[in-house]
Amino acid sequence: MNIQINGEKHEIRSGETLAGLVKTLHAQKKQRIAVLLNDDLISADKQAGHILKEGDRVEILTFAGGG
């Protein structure tokens, strides 16, 4: 199944959840992130309930501090 992640095409397994995808991509990172699915912000507690579909667009945004 094909989706877009941060503007790039990726093939993922059928039935993958948004939470599973985020965990796979950010397993070792300690960053705070925001996740958008088809331009809708999805909170961390709701990501497990979203099963990804062909053509979905996922954006994973990291927060950057500055001063």
Image (spheres, rainbow, N blue to C red):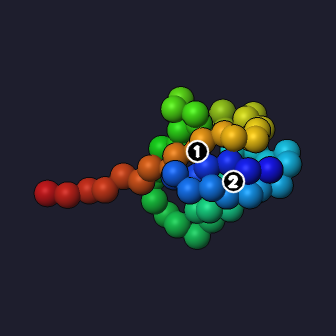
- The number of numbered discs placed on residues in the rendered structure image is 2
What SS does tag 1 mark?
strand
**Horizontally, is 57 left or right of 19 in the view?**
left
Q: Which mark is residue 31?
A: none
Residue denoted by label 1 = 58
The residue drawn where x is 68% and y is 48% is: 3
Q: Earlier in the sequence, mark 1 or mark 2?
A: 2
Residue 31 higher or lower than 34, as above or below: below
Residue 43 shows in this picture: no
Estimate the x, y position of residue 49 in percent, counting from the top left.
75, 34
Residue 58 percent across, percent down from the top left:
58, 44
Q: Quadrant of the C terminus?
A: bottom left
**Residue at horizontal 58%, vertical 62%?**
26
Asked if marks 1 and 2 touch (Cβ < 8 Å), the reply is yes
Q: Residues within 10 Å of mark 2 (few under 14, many from 20)?
A: some
Residue 8 drawn at (x, y percent): 56, 56
Query: How far apart are the two marked residues, 1 and 2, measured between alpha carbons?
Result: 10 Å
Q: Which three-letter amino acid code belongs to the residue tagged 1?
A: Val
Q: Residue furthest top?
A: 40
Q: Is residue 55 left or right of residue 8?
A: right
Q: Secondary structure at mark 2?
A: helix
Percent position of residue 57, x then y = 60, 41
Q: Which marked residue is nearer to the observer: mark 1 or mark 2?
A: 1
**Does residue 15 lie above or below 29 as drawn?**
above
What residue is drawn where x is 63% and y is 56%?
Answer: 9
Q: Residue at x 51, y 52 (%)?
A: 6
> What residue does disc 2 label?
21
Q: Is residue 53 left or right of residue 32?
A: right
